[in-house]
Image (cartoon, rainbow, N blue to C red):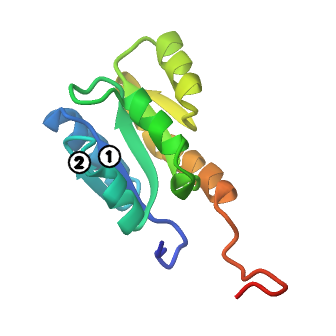
Amino acid sequence: MTQRQDGKGAVLVIDDSDISRAEMMRVLQAAGLEVIGLASPIGATRVILNGNVSAVVIDIEMPSLRGDRLAALFRGNPRMAGIGVVLVSGEKNDELTRLAIEARADEAVSKSALSGLPDAVRRAMARGESQRPSQRPSRGGDV
């Protein structure tokens, strides 16, 4: 995975609502983050693995696949170990927190408090960075 010069990749925002996705992208771009948007989880794995993505923001309520289930799938894929995951929803905070814990997401943000999204994404990126396998060559006979 290539990285921008500042060491941070893009943020992938997945939300079936055009209005919500556009607002989340606007908030993140205003905070200086590079953003990619998808209206569906279909193709998200390809975008993450082939692109320069350091974090993914996923809406929980989507018709094709719930965001918490998508986050759990990402967490179960070793090739995505270094991707920060932030769940967003209009759910009440207690329910959102419970779903985020179950899905092993790094952060959870209510759609009513999107001003906190950039900080949540940066924290998720930092956690993801610490989980990425080392890029240094191994010592010994491995090539």
Q: Position of residue 7 (x, y in %)?
A: 55, 71
Quadrant (top left/top right/bottom left/bottom right) for the C terminus: bottom right
**Left or right of residue 37: residue 116:** right
**Gap between marks 2 and 1, in whole Å?**
6 Å
Q: Write the residue at 41% across / 67% down.
A: 52
Q: Write the residue at 40% across / 35% down.
A: 70
Q: Position of residue 99 (x, y in %)?
A: 50, 20
Say which residue label 2 marks. 38
**Res 2 seen here:** yes
Which residue is most to the front?
141
Labelled disc at residue 13: 1
Mark 2 and mark 1 residues within 8 Å of each other at the beta carbon: yes
Residue nearest the viewer, comparing 100 with 4 = 100
The three-letter amino acid code for the residue at tag 1 is Val
The three-letter amino acid code for the residue at tag 2 is Leu
Q: Write the residue at 29% across / 42% down.
A: 14
